[in-house]
């Protein structure tokens, strides 16, 4: 599914946990989505901050965009086997 998201930035984290000794490797981006009020009298305005996992390939594409952040970016969203939403492509 294609969607345009306001991207604030991203991070790549890779190393060994000091606590457990296990390797970790994850990549994510920080986005703003339209704020969503819930409930009978709920209301909202502006953006709310969220984050998504992103593939390494999509992360590299995002880093290469010649734009100041935040920036409105077209992304492809997918759902993995654990029903988690993540970004698989940029553009």
Image (cartoon, rainbow, N blue to C red):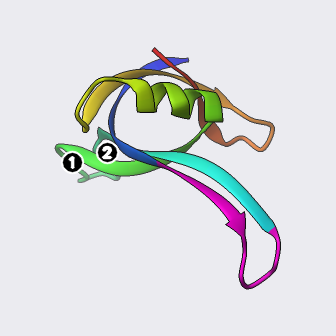
Residue found at the far bottom of this picture:
19
State the image coordinates of residue 28 (x, y, percent, origin top left). Answer: 53, 47
State the image quarter where residue 78 is shown: top right
| Residue 90's disc number | none
> Split into 4 quadrants, where in the image is the N terminus?
top right
Is residue 12 rendered magenta in the image?
A: yes
Q: Residues within 10 Å of mark 1 (few under 14, many from 20)?
A: few
Q: Secondary structure at mark 1?
A: loop
Magenta span: 11-22
Q: Is residue 19 above or below residue 57?
A: below
Circles 1 and 2 in contact, beta carbons < 8 Å: yes
Q: Residue at x 42, y 26 (%)?
A: 64
**83 displayed left or right of 87:** right
Q: Label 1: which residue?
A: 44
User: Which of the pair 37/45 is nearer the observer?
Assistant: 45
User: Which of the pair 76/8 is nearer the observer?
Assistant: 8
**78 displayed left or right of 40:** right
**83 displayed left or right of 86:** right
Q: Residue at x 34, y 53 (%)?
A: 39
């Amino acid at each position: 599914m294609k969607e345009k998201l306001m991207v604030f930035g991203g991070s790549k984290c890779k190393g060994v946990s000091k606590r457990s000794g296990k390797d970790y490797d994850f990549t994510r981006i920080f986005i703003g989505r339209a704020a969503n009020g819930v409930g009978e009298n709920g209301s909202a305005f502006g953006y709310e901050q969220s984050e998504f996992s992103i593939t390494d390939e999509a992360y590299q594409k995002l880093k290469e965009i010649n734009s100041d952040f935040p920036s409105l970016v077209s992304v492809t969203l997918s759902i993995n086997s654990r029903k988690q939403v993540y970004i698989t492509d940029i553009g």
